[in-house]
Image (tube, rainbow, N blue to C red):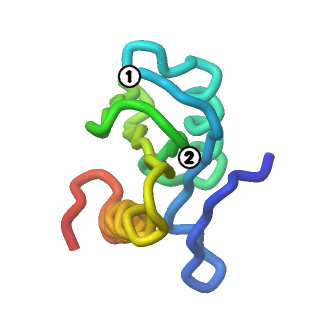
Amino acid sequence: MRPDLTWWDGRSCVFVGDAKYKKITHASVPNADLYQLLAYATALDLPGGLLIYAQGEDEPREYHVRHAGKRLEVAALDISGTLDETLARVKSLSEKVRLFRCSPLTGED
């Protein structure tokens, strides 16, 4: 298994994410995608991970996996519009990744 996105501090993985190039609605996030991210987080012994879709709902969504202690977050990256608009959205998403990396369960440094 190889996730699309990882962040390593030396030999320790501190973030995992997976990217999907498909449109979703939060009511229809495919279970298979969530299970895949859960498998990555579990295999890397992380408290959770981030699933990024190319299009979909603007509001991020979180899933808490009971008894596993994992938080799976779903976000969409709208890639339409100008390059500057897209880069601004990428920058916003990169801040979410940074916060996830600092403290995956709480978002605090």
Q: Residue 11: tell me if it is visible.
A: yes
Residue drawn at the location 35% of the way across and 29% of the way down: 63
Answer above or below: position of 49 versus 94. above
In the image, 94 versus 98, the foreground residue is 94
Residue drawn at the location 47% of the way across and 14% of the way down: 28
Residue 57, x across and y down, in percent: 35, 31
The C terminus lies in quadrant: bottom left
**Of the numbered discs in the image, which one, if any, rests on residue 41?**
2
Does residue 2 appear left or right of residue 61 in this picture?
right
Residue 27, x across and y down, in percent: 38, 14
Instruction: Check disc 1 and give the amino acid type.
Output: His
In the image, 80 versus 10, the foreground residue is 80
**Of the numbered discs in the image, which one, if any, rests on residue 26?**
1
Q: Secondary structure at mark 1?
A: helix
In the image, 38 versus 86, the foreground residue is 86
> In terms of sequence position, does the residue under pointer 2 or pointer 1 come before the other?
1
Q: Secondary structure at mark 2?
A: helix
Does residue 43 appear left or right of residue 30 in this picture?
right
In the image, 57 versus 82, the foreground residue is 82
Instruction: Check disc 2 and give the amino acid type.
Output: Ala
Answer above or below: position of 67 versus 90. above
Answer above or below: position of 28 versus 73. above
Answer above or below: position of 88 versus 81. below
Residue 29, x across and y down, in percent: 49, 21
CB contact under 8 Å: marks 2 and 1? no
Residue drawn at the location 54% of the way across and 29% of the way down: 23
Does residue 4 appear left or right of residue 53 in this picture?
right
Q: Residues under labels 2 and 1: Cα distance?
A: 20 Å
